[in-house]
Amino acid sequence: MGQSASIPSIKVLSSSSSPSSSSSSRRAKLPSAATAAWRSVAMAEGDDASGDGDAAPARSNTEDLPDECLALVFQSLGSGDRKRCSLVCRRWLAVEGQSRHRLALDARAALLEAAPAIFARFDAVSKLALKCDRRADSIGDEALALIAARCPNLTRLKLRSCRALTDNGMSAVAQCCRGLRKLSVGSCAFGFKGVEAVVRGSSALEELSIKRLRGLPDVTAAGNAIVGSASLRSVCLKELYNGQCFAPLIAGSSNLKALKLIRCSGDWDRLLADIAAKVPGIVEIHLEKLQVSDRGLAALSFCADLGILHLVKTPECTDAGLATVAERCHLLRKIHIDGWKTNRIGDEGLIIVARQCPNLQELVLIGVNPTTRSLGLIASNCHNLERLALCGSDTFGDAEITCIASKCMALKKLCIKGCPVSDQGMEALAEGCPKLVKVKVKKCRGVTPGCADWLMQCRDGMLAVNLDTAGPMEQPEGSVGESGILENNEQLIDQIGAVDLLPSSSNSRSSPWKTRMGLFAGRNFVASAFRRWSHGSSNSNHTLL
């Protein structure tokens, strides 16, 4: 659909709509994709001087296109091409603005004066992002109310670092944007009542994401102010000091399917028990750097439809808690565990997963030490296992990879980082895992480039092997640093998710496709790269939401 725009580009478009602009300056700004269209309109304006001043200007063929068809053409272009096409003539400027549905604006205080002109042109915006530099003064309630009034069809709103906004501004959004379906706020200063206003006022709200919201009250002061919303499908709370004040909202949203709690303070065991009892239909749980124990996992195990479980740096969770979930949630298909090198989750819990979760398709183990005991059972019992990643494991060696190669018949993607595997273990992949198409190996000292090249030759070029042996062996940063091992390993799994099948060099430092694939681009790869593996390659169109 439509592409995003920014304030600087809007100023250029507004100043370029004058008919006095020269044809040469237009042509210099247009890419090759839009040059032909510009020439057609330029002929209609008489810009192709024929030397005969009395000759009638040629007629533009685009005049026969209805505005709706022209809008469809614009919607298939990238953001840059759309901006350039809007410079061609007044009609294209108007149609391009009316057909643009996504907009990203610099939300500094000066936006208040520019907003009327901006939204007079872009009057069909349904997805809006307002982002302000942390060191600048952001828009306030007056500007947000004006924008909300000009965008009654808004379905998605993202607010970042808008510290001048208060609950009153969010109330204006709730009143004007009744069809809002997704709200994402981060580093803002409004509080509990602002979120409550949107939840109550937007009956179609499906996704709510709150990060670093500064105006939250104590849990006891909030009480049960926000009742649940039947429309909510996904709630994400991240880096909230008093995030537990949203527990009544979560527990009261009977149709909730996805819950993500990331670095929120407080003990969550009791609240998770209440949530699981009232919302048993949850299918995705993501717990990261959270104070939760086996008691909380036992409560979540009553969500019988649970299919996706992420346990990231939750040191109080053990094999017993994982086993309880596996014994009751037989539909689990994706499990991500970052054990944070605590050795509290290992073979015992994974064995129960192997026996109770036959539908498992994706398994990511970071800072966990499995052996052939558990991996052998997983490979034998989970016949649909297609994606496997092991990072920072001290026990995943040649015996384990040989076990995987001999028993994982459905495996398609394998990712190994910082594990004691060698060429001998990698050689088992030459004949094992018949459906294997992508392998990524990083910081494994025992694996050499020669082995990787040999492995690709043995698979007749049908296997992409990305080997990165750059630098000395390092301890996973997640065991000591704030960013954590998950962020460090996100690059690894993101790379393997983007690899194309190329039978050329295996060393990622010298491989030309590494540059083309944009390695090390993105931090949230464990969640995103495997999603691409499951659903095919994603289409990144540089939009804001």
Image (cartoon, helix red, strand yellow):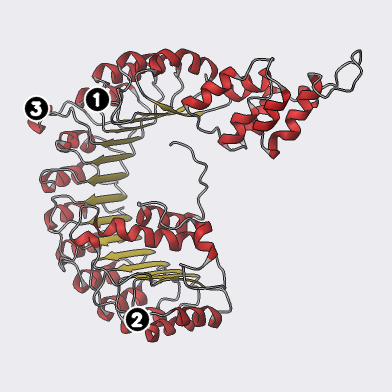
Mark closest to the chain's N terminus, 3 or 2: 3
Q: CA distance from mark 3 to mark 1?
A: 14 Å
Classify 456 as above or below 295.
below
Residue 196 - label: 1
Quick one: label 3, few (<14), some, or many (20+) residues within 10 Å? Answer: few
The residue pinned by badge 3 equals 221
Query: In the picture provided, is 83 more to the left or to the right than 532?
Result: right
Q: Position of residue 91 (x, y in %)?
A: 68, 19
Please state, as top left, top right, bottom left or bottom right, where the C terminus lies in the image: top left
Residue 104 - label: none
Please state, as top left, top right, bottom left or bottom right, where the N terminus lies in the image: top right
Q: Position of residue 138 (x, y in %)?
A: 31, 23
* Callout 2: SS: loop
Mark closest to the chain's N terminus, 3 or 1: 1
Quick one: label 2, few (<14), some, or many (20+) residues within 10 Å? Answer: some
Tag 3: amino acid:
Ala
* Callout 1: SS: helix
Q: CA distance from mark 2 to mark 1?
A: 55 Å
The residue pinned by badge 2 equals 446
Tag 2 and tag 1, C-beta contact below 8 Å: no
At x 58%, y 79%, the residue is 460
Classify 404 as above or below 272.
below
The quarter of the displayed image where residue 191 is located: top left
Q: Position of residue 539 (x, y in %)?
A: 52, 47
Tag 2: amino acid:
Gly
* Callout 3: SS: helix
The quarter of the displayed image where residue 28 is located: top right
Query: In the picture provided, is 11 more to the left or to the right than 182?
Result: right
